[in-house]
């Protein structure tokens, strides 16, 4: 382990600053491009190194004071030391870099990143852990709990629930605390940004609006907001509890299937004229499975809207889908301020549909 001075040149996806020692990348958390820092090398490999920040020798103008007393120890947030407007610039740049480096997509049609109205106090739910009387989050890079009295990125109602939980001396385990009542199924975490995301997706689905297939639909977050615009909606979701929640408020035009997307989507696209189908995909961080990507290449719908929570898998998938789709726009969305997470919505259109317009 050795101490060195380092110039930070960039911020990698995941939130760590990147400098160079002897030609190889060195990753340092809690730093900003343009800063001169002193670090302690704690891990060194052939092609990269990792270091801990000891001192900021020359601070970037974007550096700011974190609002959380646990920042740096807690494993949740990565960017509280960075002014929010600069966080947005970093995330937008990281999306473009991923598309270029991993998807071989040069000059992607990037739109401005959608900011969160509230950089703090936005999370409508958190999951905390309890063990031996300690209630909180896991420490950064350690499987040890950090005792947390309040979380600045959570809504006040969530922090009130956290205070109640702590006072109850809970049993060991994990607990999800929510600001809103309802079924315990996946839902978007930042309410105002989620509504803007739904609005953007709706704008990307032009006529004809015969059939919307909402893959990985959850409880119908997109489908419910768009059902007035389509003659039919079919949602596909493996979680039967989410499907039951979607069915509970379904209109006669909505059908929700508790099924595997990989096996079901191909059948639906074969049974319906692709030119009349609009498709939303909102997969987990692993992106679209190979089978789904192959289905979209063999039976491309008229319009595809891809909602992603991981730029790297998004870039991989778009690199393949370009064979049959044109990328009309890429819009980063900041669902999780202060963290390194990036949401993105991409508007694609069947190449044949574009060619037929000329």
Image (spheres, rainbow, N blue to C red):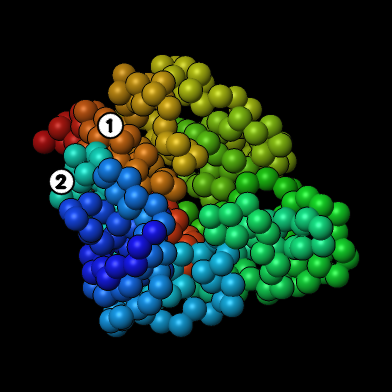
For mark 2, give the secondary structure. Answer: loop
For mark 1, give the secondary structure. Answer: helix
Task: Say which of 150 and 200 sits in front.
Answer: 150
Which residue position is annotated with label 1? 321
Task: Say which of 4 and 80 sits in front.
Answer: 4
* Residue ranking furthest to the right: 168
Residue 113 visible (yes or no): no
Horizontal side of 271 relative to 142 (left or right) equals: left
Residue 203: x %, y % from top left: 37, 52
Splitting the image into 4 quarters, where does residue 127 fall?
bottom right
Q: Residue at x 63, y 42 (%)?
A: 219
Which residue position is annotated with label 2? 106
- Quarter of the image containing the C terminus? top left
* Residue ranking furthest to the front: 1
Horizontal side of 167 relative to 140 (left or right) equals: right
Can you say whether 274 is above or below 287 in the image?
above
Horizontal side of 51 relative to 242 (left or right) equals: left
The dot on residue 129 is none
Task: Say which of 70 and 67 sits in front.
Answer: 70
Count of marks placed on residues? 2
């Amino acid at each position: 382990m050795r101490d060195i001075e380092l110039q930070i040149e960039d911020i990698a996806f995941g939130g760590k600053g990147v400098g160079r020692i002897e030609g190889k990348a060195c990753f340092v958390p809690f730093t900003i491009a343009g800063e001169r820092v002193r670090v302690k090398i704690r891990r060194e490999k052939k092609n990269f190194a990792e270091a801990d920040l000891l001192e900021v020798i020359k601070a970037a103008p974007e550096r700011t004071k974190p609002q959380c007393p646990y920042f740096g120890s807690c494993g949740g947030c990565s960017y509280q030391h960075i002014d929010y407007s600069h966080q947005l610039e970093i995330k937008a740049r990281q999306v473009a870099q991923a598309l270029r480096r991993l998807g071989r997509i040069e000059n992607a049609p990037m739109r401005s990143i959608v900011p969160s109205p509230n950089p703090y106090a936005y999370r409508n739910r958190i999951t905390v852990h309890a063990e031996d009387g300690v209630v909180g989050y896991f420490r950064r890079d350690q499987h040890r709990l950090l005792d947390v009295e309040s979380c600045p990125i959570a809504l006040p109602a969530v922090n009130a629930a956290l205070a109640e939980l702590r006072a109850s001396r809970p049993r060991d385990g994990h607990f999800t605390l929510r600001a809103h009542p309802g079924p315990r199924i996946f839902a978007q975490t930042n309410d105002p940004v989620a509504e803007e995301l739904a609005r953007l997706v709706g704008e990307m689905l032009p006529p004809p609006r015969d059939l919307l297939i909402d893959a990985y639909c959850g409880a119908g977050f997109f489908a419910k907001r768009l059902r007035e615009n389509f003659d039919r909606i079919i949602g596909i979701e493996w979680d039967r509890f989410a499907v039951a929640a979607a069915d509970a408020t379904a209109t006669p035009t909505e059908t929700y299937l508790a099924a595997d997307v990989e096996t079901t989507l191909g059948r639906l696209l074969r049974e319906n004229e692709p030119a009349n189908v609009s498709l939303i995909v909102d997969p987990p961080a692993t992106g679209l499975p190979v089978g789904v990507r192959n289905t979209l290449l063999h039976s491309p719908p008229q319009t595809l809207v891809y909602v992603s929570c991981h730029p790297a898998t998004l870039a991989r998938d778009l690199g393949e889908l370009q064979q049959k789709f044109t990328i009309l726009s890429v819009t980063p969305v900041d669902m999780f301020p202060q963290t390194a997470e990036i949401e993105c919505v991409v508007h694609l259109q069947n190449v044949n549909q574009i060619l037929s317009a000329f």
